[in-house]
């Protein structure tokens, strides 16, 4: 992985003064080293995907990452033929195979990874939030995109906020982020950073422009001072080309790491994210006119 150079021909559009340098220290009172990693994901290859996820976590751990985010449905692949195929590669939240992933998570680090969750007769598009010793949450996606509605049930929450070793972690999944209310709700609930596993299908856009989903995430980050760690797919699956939009966005809405080999890493300032002040006269949250909207 690299923090400054994108693989597959894309250089990281770092803004001047960014804290995404290789020499930045581990998370402390103001800094959190994060990694968005995107290993190869093969549809239907549950065991192989788990092995590749484990390797990706280990690689991010060697870089000192304390928040590691992997794509949506990383354990299974995304473009299912039908509900039965999804069920064949679903995991329960208490499946013993989770332990093999947790063994490689660094102490005091958090991993967010998407999976197809089986719960009795129900299936959910879920993000597991894991530490080495605990399962902090399983967030079930509430906004289902396209054919997901034929496979999964909708979850009951529009994102979640989880108490993590470094602070408060917001978690949402892919299409959730295209509803501005979701990241805003998580920011108002005290999230310090948003983990966003995604599978973004490639869509047409003007030459030189970012993917629209990435632009939306940048806007959400800026409007709430909520950094976003996005892990996206690359390549293609059953005729669907992926956007390759893995990125880390800081609290000002700028991309500080983008589309690097197998992932991207950066150091985010939690102090900057937690302060909503806009000196000398404004505050992002205090200035809200909730009586008007």
Image (spheres, rainbow, N blue to C red):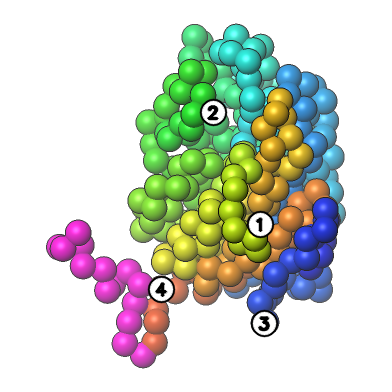
Q: Quadrant of residue 115?
A: top right
Circle 2 residue: 125
Q: Which mark is residue 17?
A: 3
Marks 4 and 3, how far apart at CA: 20 Å
Earlier residue among tags 3 and 2? 3
Marks 2 and 4, how far apart at CA: 32 Å
From the viewer's perspective, tell me whether residue 145 is left or right of residue 107: left
Name the residue at 42% across, 29% down.
Answer: 155
Q: Are marks 4 and 3 in contact (CB under 8 Å)?
A: no
Number of numbered discs visible in the structure rendering: 4
Task: Judge whether 200 appears above or below 255 on screen.
Answer: above
Earlier residue among tags 4 and 3? 3
Q: Tag 2: Cα neighbours inside 10 Å, few (<14), some, or many (≥20)?
A: many
Q: In what element is the residue under mark 4?
A: loop
Task: Judge whether 115 appears above or below 224 on screen.
Answer: above
- The part of the chain drawn in magenta is 280-293
Circle 4 residue: 276
Q: Position of residue 211 (x, y in %)?
A: 59, 54
From the viewer's perspective, tell me whether residue 187 is left or right of residue 132: left
Q: Tag 3: Cα neighbours inside 10 Å, few (<14), some, or many (≥20)?
A: few
Circle 1 residue: 247
Earlier residue among tags 1 and 4? 1
Q: Position of residue 179 (x, y in %)?
A: 40, 47
For the C terminus, which image quadrant? bottom left
């Amino acid at each position: 992985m690299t923090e400054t150079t994108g693989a597959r021909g894309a250089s990281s559009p770092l803004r001047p003064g960014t804290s995404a340098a290789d020499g930045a220290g581990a998370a402390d009172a103001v800094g959190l080293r994060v990694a968005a990693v995107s290993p190869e994901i093969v549809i239907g290859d549950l065991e192989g995907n788990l092995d590749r996820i484990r390797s990706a976590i280990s690689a991010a751990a060697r870089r000192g990452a304390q928040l590691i985010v992997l794509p949506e449905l990383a354990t299974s692949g995304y473009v299912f033929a039908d509900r039965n195929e999804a069920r064949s590669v679903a995991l329960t939240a208490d499946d013993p195979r989770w332990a093999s992933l947790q063994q490689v998570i660094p102490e005091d680090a958090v991993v967010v990874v998407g999976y197809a969750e089986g719960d009795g007769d129900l299936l959910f598009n879920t993000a597991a939030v894991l530490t080495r010793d605990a399962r902090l949450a399983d967030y079930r996606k509430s906004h289902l995109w396209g054919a997901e509605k034929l496979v999964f049930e909708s979850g009951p929450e529009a994102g979640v906020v989880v108490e993590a070793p470094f602070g408060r972690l917001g978690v949402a999944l892919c299409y959730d982020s295209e509803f501005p209310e979701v990241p805003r709700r998580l920011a108002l609930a005290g999230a310090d950073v948003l983990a966003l596993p995604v599978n973004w299908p490639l869509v047409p856009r003007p030459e030189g422009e970012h993917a629209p989903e990435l632009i939306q995430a940048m806007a959400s980050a800026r409007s709430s001072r909520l950094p976003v760690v996005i892990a996206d797919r690359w390549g293609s699956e059953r005729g669907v080309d992926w956007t390759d939009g893995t990125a880390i966005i800081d609290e000002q809405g700028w991309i500080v790491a983008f589309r690097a080999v197998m992932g991207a890493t950066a150091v985010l300032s939690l102090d900057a994210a937690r302060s909503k002040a806009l000196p000398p006269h404004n505050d992002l949250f205090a200035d809200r006119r909730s009586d008007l909207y």
